[in-house]
Image (cartoon, rainbow, N blue to C red):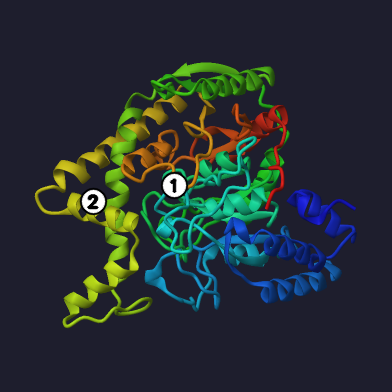
């Protein structure tokens, strides 16, 4: 029998169905893997008792023939998703030991379909970061290393725990969230598949908010097929979320293996940046060639407002963060640092509870929303956002089915290597991903190759609104051509 932790979700589903092993055995194998990999710091809370109880209940359901699409599959949950009676902190001191009395819609749908929760995964504090170094639980370590080096690398952020755990075979898949690239960038850094669905495709109810008009939940998995299986359970209309779109959820897995012959793939000229590493350029060219060989047609497209996307994003996102984080005041829940007045209590609590990056973004956001600056910054950024969205609409109106770009401007970098003196250096990691959030579009990052030091690199496909199926079909072409990569075990 294959090692239980190295199977894909699709393989595990087949094994559970033909009684090769039980969900409890599958769960125990992953719990042992988590215990052996604590040096990666991917899980910040392990829930072995709950996992085993869920697995036993699922085994009983499977025996009765009532399994469900994810029956018995062990998953990790990003610490941004509220999990009933299980601590949820957004990896911030300010939430302390907050234990929600409710379950997020996305996770409740996973449990409905039979998945098993292994524990909560590390992330950047309030999802603010591109390297998973801002968490109050410390940085996550990427299971990949440069050839011949022992330097600890970042797994990307903010969903670094999710990507690291999936890549290191600690869970079969994980929930994640993407506000400016927080699913796709970590996926590219760890050779996993990350899907950022169309805005409104997955409910945001019960997920700790960062920037409400940009946040979107999605899966990180080992293969394109696995991400499609997870996505089907995570997606769907939720009346509790006013931004959730009421349209049916297709069978995403059915899109895997579908012909891409005749599809038009846009190659945006604005993504060819000055100083872009040659290996990223080479990877992009290779990816385009694979799609062409599969019968797709390549066309050059223009997205002229791309250069304004990053600055506009770093006005819109902090503005919404400033508004969303106003609720953490030391009065109702979480951390409380007393003061001589209510104002001092607020100040003390927020100064103690929020990390440097969160404080930085809250201050930027408060500034751009303040009287006298709102029109100059926030309003202008929203107008730019409309133009970015229109660029994509114009491409799709010309018959383009999807757009191919690099996922990141480089491979994973070392822990502590970037952003220390200049935070903008870190923000530049989101250069290829933020446009997708600004326009509310779906995007997928698929492992496509390695750099000269043996580190994984990913390609990104951007699709039409609510057309994730096309991305799964195209993503599988890239995956088949590039092959799958697993990090050599050192932990």
Where is residue 329 drawn, in percent x and y?
A: 28, 73
The residue that mark 2 highlights is 364
Residue that label 1 marks: 416
| Residue at horizontal 52 percent and vertical 42 percent from the top | 184
Residue 150 pos. (x, y %): 60, 43
Does 231 sit above or below residue 405? below
- Element type at mark 2: helix
Q: Residue furthest left?
A: 372
Name above or below for residue 50 compared with residue 464: below
Quadrant hosting residue 117: bottom right
Question: In the image shown, does 432 or 439 lie closer to the viewer?
Answer: 432
Q: Can I make out residue 262 in this image? A: no
Residue at 35% across, 46% down:
420
Q: Is residue 433 left or right of residue 305?
A: right
Checking the image for residue 29, the label placed there is none
Q: Quick one: label 2, few (<14), some, or many (20+) residues within 10 Å? A: some
From the viewer's side, name the closer residue of 183 and 38.
38
Residue 374 x, y percent position in the rendering: 16, 48
Give 32 or 321, whichever is nearer the viewer. Answer: 32
């Amino acid at each position: 029998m294959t090692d239980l932790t190295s199977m894909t979700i699709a393989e595990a589903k087949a094994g559970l169905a033909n009684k090769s092993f039980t969900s409890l055995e599958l769960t125990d194998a992953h719990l042992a893997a988590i215990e052996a990999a604590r040096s990666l710091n991917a899980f910040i809370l392990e829930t072995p008792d709950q996992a085993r109880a869920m697995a036993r209940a699922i085994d009983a359901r499977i025996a009765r023939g009532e399994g469900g699409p994810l029956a018995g599959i062990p998953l990790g949950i990003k610490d941004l998703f509220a999990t009933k009676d299980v601590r949820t902190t957004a990896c911030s001191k300010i939430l302390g030991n907050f234990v929600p009395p409710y379950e997020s819609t996305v996770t409740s749908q996973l449990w409905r379909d039979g998945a098993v929760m292994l524990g909560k995964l590390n992330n950047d504090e309030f999802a603010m970061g591109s390297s998973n170094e801002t968490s109050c639980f410390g940085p996550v370590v990427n299971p990949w290393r440069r050839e011949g080096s022992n330097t600890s690398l970042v797994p990307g952020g903010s969903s670094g725990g999710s990507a690291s755990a999936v890549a290191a075979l600690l869970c079969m898949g994980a929930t994640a969230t993407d506000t400016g690239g927080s699913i796709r960038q970590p996926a590219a850094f760890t050779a996993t598949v990350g899907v950022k669905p169309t805005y409104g495709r997955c409910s945001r109810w019960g997920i700790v908010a960062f920037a409400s008009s940009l946040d979107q939940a999605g899966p990180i998995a080992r293969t394109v097929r696995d991400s499609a299986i997870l996505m089907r359970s995570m997606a769907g209309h939720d009346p509790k979320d006013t931004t959730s779109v009421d349209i049916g959820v297709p069978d995403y897995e059915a899109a895997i293996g579908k012909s891409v012959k005749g599809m038009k793939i846009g190659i945006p000229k604005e993504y060819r940046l000055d100083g872009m590493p040659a290996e990223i350029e080479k990877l992009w060219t290779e990816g385009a060639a694979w799609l062409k060989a599969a019968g797709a047609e390549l066309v050059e497209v223009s997205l002229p407002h791309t250069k304004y996307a990053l600055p506009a994003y770093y006005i819109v996102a902090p503005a919404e963060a400033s508004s969303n984080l106003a609720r953490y005041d030391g009065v109702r829940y979480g951390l409380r640092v007393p003061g001589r007045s209510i104002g001092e209590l607020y100040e003390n609590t927020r100064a103690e509870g929020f990390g440097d990056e969160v404080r930085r973004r809250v201050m930027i956001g408060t500034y751009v929303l303040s009287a006298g600056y709102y029109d100059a910054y926030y309003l202008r950024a929203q107008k730019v956002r409309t133009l970015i969205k229109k660029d994509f609409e114009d491409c799709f109106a010309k018959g383009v089915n999807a757009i191919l770009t690099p996922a990141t401007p480089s491979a994973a970098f070392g822990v502590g290597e970037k952003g220390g003196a200049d935070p903008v250096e870190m923000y530049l990691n989101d250069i290829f991903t933020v446009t997708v959030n600004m326009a509310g579009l779906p995007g997928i990052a698929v492992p496509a190759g390695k750099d000269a030091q043996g580190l994984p690199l990913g390609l990104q496909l951007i699709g039409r609104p609510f057309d994730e199926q096309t991305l799964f079909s195209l993503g599988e072409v890239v995956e088949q051509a590039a092959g799958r990569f697993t990090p050599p075990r050192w932990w």
